[in-house]
Image: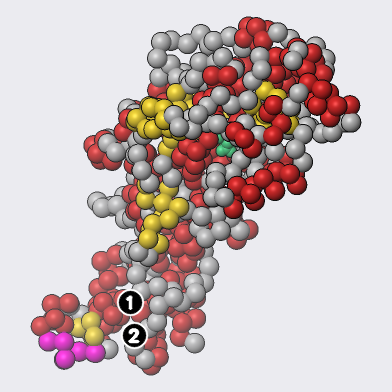
Amino acid sequence: MDLNKLADRLLPGDYPDLSFYEEKYPPRALPKGAEVTRLAPSPTGFIHLGNLFVAIANERIAHQSGGVYYLRIEDTDLKRKVEGAVEAVKNALRYFDIKFDEGAKIGGDETYAPWYQRERAEIYRAYAKHLIKIGRAYPCFCTEEELSALREEQTKNKEITGYYGKYAKCRDLSEEEIMKNLDEKKPFVLRLRSMGDPAHKLKFVDAIKGEIAVTENDQDVVILKSDGIPTYHFAHAIDDHLMRTTLVLRGEEWLASLPIHLELFDALGFSRPRYGHNCSLMKQDGETRRKLSKRKDPELSLEFYRKEGYFPRAVKVYMLTLLNSNFEEWYLKNPSEPLENFKFSVGKMSKSGTLFDLDKLNDISKNELARLSAEEMYDFLSAWAEEYGSEEEKAQLQAREKFLKALDLCMGTSGKKRRKDFVTASQAMQTLSYFFKLPERTDDYRFDAKTCGQIFDGFLKNYDFSDDAQVWFAKVKELAGSLGFAAEMKEYKANPDAFRGSVADVAEILRIAVTGKANTPDLYTIMQILGEEETRRRIKGAIS
Ligand code: GLU
C-alpha cells in the first residue's frame, strides 16, 4: 500500500515537516536538573481537591528545581466544556497561592503556546499524518453499532473489551477497501496500529510508586476522532513532548492509560517524560475507606474551601502534610517559615491511598489563624466577605476599629495566651456577630426567670461604664452575694448547699443576656466594646 498516498487522502493538504515543530518548540534552556511540570485539566468547571493536591506537588517540584510550571487546558472533548471554567481553575489555584509561569489565561513566555488543545489541532494532524506514513496509524470505519456489538461479544466471552488483535477489523483493510469507503464518504477515525503484546510485562519506574509492572498496550486506540479532533491520549503525548515536560505527576486514575501513553511516545519517536502517579484522597466512611466523591462529599470541591473561607495557608499546610511524610516534622520546627523553604521530594510521596480528614484540617486551620495579628485576620475576613459575605457581614466589617477590638479580644492577640476559636472566615463572622447585632440565644439560662430578672435589675442599677475591670467585677460579686449566690468560688466549693449558686453563675446569666452564649471571652471587655447604651439595651431586653 502506498502510505504517502493514503496519508494525503486521509488528511489532505500540506502539513509542515515535523522538524518544523521540533524547531518551533525547542528544548527549554534551563539549568541542569530543572523540571518542567504542568497541570492539564479539562475545562469541566469542576476543580477539586485532587487537582489541588497534585498541583501543589507539581508546583513545588518545578519551582524548587528552577524549572517551569505551566497550565494547559485539555479541551478536546467539547461535550464536557463549561463556560468560564478556565477562569475558575485559575482563580481557585490562585487562592491557594499556586503560581504558574505560563499557560492559559496566565500568559508568560509564549514560546510554547497555545495552551488550549483546541488551538493546536493542526499540530496533532501533522503528527497523525506522519504516523499514517510510517504505518503506525490507520483509518477505521466501524460504526457505533458495530463497536457496541463488539463490546457485547467481548463482554459475553469474558474478554478484555476494546479494539485490538483479531477484533481490530479495519486494521488490515486493503487499499481498495479503504479507498472505496472513502469514495462512499464513510466517516472514519484514525487509530494507532499497536505493536504491543499483552503477554509482555514491562518494568516501569514510576516517580512516586517506584518499580511497577506494566502490561504492554495492544489496543488500537483512537488518536483522531472523525471530526479531526485528537483524543486526550494523543494530544497529551504531543503536547508534553513539544512543551518539553520532563515530569508528569498526575492522579493514579491515569495509571491504567499509561501503557497507551508509553506506546504513543515510542511510536511518535519522542523520548518519554518521567511519570509519577499520585495516590487518591480517601475518606473514612464508617468501617471502610473510599475515594472522595463528587456526589457525597462537598469537601471535594475547591469551591467549598473558598466559600467557607478556609485560610489558604492552612489548606496548603494540610496538603503538604499529606503529600510528604517528613513535612509535619519540619513544620513543627519551622512554623513561621515560608512553605517554599521546605524541601519537597517526590520520593517522599505516599505510594497508596491517603486519608483526608476534615477534622485534621480544621485543627490546622485553628492553629494557623491563631498566628495572625488582629489586622491580618481583619484583612482575611474582609477579602472573604468581599466575595462570599452577606450585606450584613460587609457592613459589620465597615466598623473597622470596633471589629479590630473584637478580634483582639477573641484571638487573645494582646494577652499572654492566644485563643484558637476561629476555624474559617464564615465561622469567625458567625462567632463575632454578637458584637454587631442582638444575638440569637444559643445557650439557655440555667436559672428561673425570676432569679435572672433579679440579676439583670441589680446589675443595671449599679452599672457604670467608666468602671475598670476590677471595680466592675467587685460589683458583680456584691450583686451575687446580695442574691444568695457565693461571691467567692472558694466559699461555694466548700459549701455548695449553702448557696443558690456562685458568682460564676451570675456572670453566666449576664453573659447569655449580652452575647447569647454561655462561653465567650472576657465579659467586661465585651461590654466595653459594645458601649454603655447597647449593653444596657441588651440586658433590659433580656428582662422582658
Ligand atoms: N486532562 C486530564 C485530566 O482531566 C489530564 C491527565 C494528565 O495529567 O495527563 O485530568
> According to the image, label 1 marks what residue?
508
Is 158 rendered above or below residue 333? below
Q: Secondary structure at mark 1?
A: helix
Residue 428 image offset from top left, x and y in percent: 45, 57
Q: In the visual, does 338 lie left or right of 119? A: left
For marks 1 and 2 on the same chain, the one whose residue lies earlier in the sequence: 2
**What residue is shown at x 39% (from left), y 57% (from top)?**
289
Residue 43 image offset from top left, x and y in percent: 65, 39
Residue type (three-letter) at the residue carrying disc 2: Arg
> According to the image, label 2 marks what residue?
446
Q: Quadrant of residue 187?
A: top right
* Label annotation for residue 187: none
How much space separates mark 1 and mark 2, taking CA atoms? 9 Å
**Mark 2 packing: few (<14 Cα in 10 Å), some, or many (20+)?**
few
Nearer mark to the viewer, of 1 and 2: 2
**What residue is shown at x 47% (from left), y 50% (from top)?**
310
Q: In the visual, does 99 lie left or right of 371? A: right
> How is the protein colored in the picture?
secondary structure
CB of mark 1 near ligand 1 (< 8 Å): no
Residue 418 image offset from top left, x and y in percent: 29, 52
Q: Nearer the viewer, residue 73 or 476?
A: 73
Span highlighted in magenta in the image: 495-500
Q: Quadrant of residue 121?
A: top right
Residue 399 image offset from top left, x and y in percent: 54, 54
Q: Nearer the viewer, residue 486 or 464?
A: 486
Evaluate if marks 1 and 2 touch, with contact meaning CB atoms under 8 Å apart: yes
Is 415 rendered above or below residue 8? below
